[in-house]
Image (tube, rainbow, N blue to C red):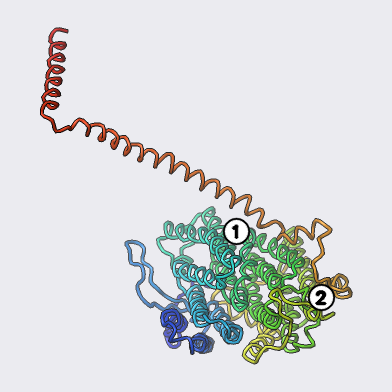
Amino acid sequence: MAEAQKVHEASGAAGGAWLLVAFPLIGAAVLLLGGKVTNAWGHLLGCATIIASFVYGVVLFFSSTGLPESERVQNLHVFDWIPVGNLQVDFGLRIDPLSISFVLLITGVGALIHIYSVGYMADDPDRRRFFGYFNLFVAAMLILVLGNSFVTLYLGWEGVGLASYLLIGWYTNRPSAATAAKKAFLMNRVGDVGLALAIFILFSQLGTTQYTQVFANLDKLSSPTITALCILLLLGACGKSGQVPLQAWLPDAMEGPTPVSALIHAATMVTAGVYLIARSNPIYSLSADGRLVVTIVGAVTLLFGSIVGCAYDDIKKVLAYSTVSQIGYMMLAVGLGPFGFALGIMHLLTHGFFKAGLFLGAGSVMHAMNDDVDMRRYGGLWRVMPITFATFGLGYLALIGFPFLSGYFSKDAIIEAAFGQEGWRGWVFGGAALLGVALTAFYMTRLMFMTFFGKQRWKELKSEDGRDYHPHEAGPVMWGPMAVLAVGSVGAGAFFALGDRLVDWLTPSLGTLHQSENHTIPEGLMPVLTIGLMVVGVLLAWLVVGRREVPVVKPDPVSFPVRAARKDLYGNALNEVLVARPGTWLTRALVYVDNKGVDGLVNGIAAGFGGSSGRLRRLQTGFVRSYAASMLAGSILVLIAFLAVRYA
């Protein structure tokens, strides 16, 4: 197993890997603490720090490729962090093919989103603070993927949670944004409990949380403990990556500015859960039950996101549920076994290109349409926004799995691997993944028809604030990053897949990756099925939307499936019934017990002493005759008591 091999001390370019985190962290500190003096150039500093990290990441990548495969896993000790008794945690970085891949995605796509934000946030008076939060977000994510222990990962994990809360709730004048930020924060804390418990178990059983030592001593853990660790780690992954049953926060996160949506949904936060499972692959390799649970969650989530995405008219929420679904594909892949880990990472990387491009394209459309997100008010935008249409269109084709674009190579490989499972699992998981292909093609084609084709409905409408629509192409600072991402949407999949380039690169991190020899469906038939279902989804979207006039006002749903999809398949209602309301009732009961029980007892005792002292105080009159009378009465009582005892 790769994790059991020797981990080398970092040298050369890897010795300066701390700079990857330092650049955006310094940028965040300057922008958030520098005050108004940084307003004029803060956005430039925000972009420069991420570009610097990306450049260093590229240097680190090429220096690593020059090493023998056995020496590509390196450890960099930065400083002693938590030296407390038996708990010895250093702040260290693990530089290996898996972490380097994530570094390039986070900083590369992140840099493009930062540059795009210069134009998108140009009119925001707090743009400098926005870039400070952006830098903080990237720094936290880099700590998460570069940390050499589960505790260091947890530091980045919580840092990402904080930054997402600040960015999702950016528009402080919108109650919906505040609610969405709070929802994201709280639902992620539920998942974080699972991750924290897993870390506690590892330390209690093995006395360490460092990856190298944990993975080398897994044979000391019992099978039930391994399975429990798999489920607890998965709970943490579900929270961060918006997987069922903790998916409800992710679509609501669209309340933040569109660049935030692109950063969260493509390059950073939602990929953290997949990274956690892939990084913990030695643990999951020892538990078939643990992998099965991961696979079930992925299959359910990919269908859940696809179905709900078919029912929304909000362009950002359609893309949000698309992210839920595509992360489901990744989770399905990493649950399939050794080869699936690499396939999940490949789809994660290709998804980073086309989903970031789609979100930035949606932001360009919103920018041109007075920030309106309702696709029913769009139509025919390809004529006035040709660059956005072209770049968005390439991302769309990559997402639905159009032949030889990025999604075709990464997603179809996952579907084939799912069908490679033995027995009923191959048919169930492979069938779910195939159904997701048709649904993805349907909801994305529906989005394309409603947004870029058909009648220009916006000509006869006004936005909610009474303004006319004047759609226009965004400036180069916005469409430039979109064009670069479109290139990745076209070619990244082929670059990673041909010759098993990515699989070979990830072998030192994930171990020897063997593809299943079992083929439930003949290999030559698989591309025919996936392309055929993609075409079916496109044709259905044309029948439902493309050949008809799109009504500006959403018609009332006529069937239960449509109503259910528009209500998120009752995911929020289920959380309300099972978690929110019982939690509220429990809180109220505890408050009542605290007020009437604990506080009542304490306050009652205090009131008793206070009342008694008040009554006794009345005996202190200051008159000698009163004191003499009381002394006489006391003496008589003592005498009576004495006589009673003496003659009893």
Q: Residues within 10 Å of mark 1 (few under 14, many from 20)?
A: many
Tag 1, which secondary structure?
Answer: helix
Residue 303 appears in the picture as rendered: yes
**Residue drawn at the location 63% of the way across and 66% of the way down:** 252
Residue 140 place in picture, x, y as percent: 48, 74
Residue 311 place in picture, x, y as percent: 76, 65
Residue 272 place in picture, x, y as percent: 56, 70
Residue under numbered circle 2? 531
Q: Residue furthest top?
A: 647
Q: Amino acid at mark 1?
A: Gly
**Residue drawn at the location 64% of the way across and 77% of the way down:** 346
Q: Amino acid at mark 2?
A: Ile
Query: Toward the viewer: 513 or 140?
Result: 140
Is 630 left, or right, of 360 in this rendering? left
Q: Quadrant location of residue 467? A: bottom right
Q: Which one is earlier in the sequence, the residue at label 2 or at label 1?
A: 1
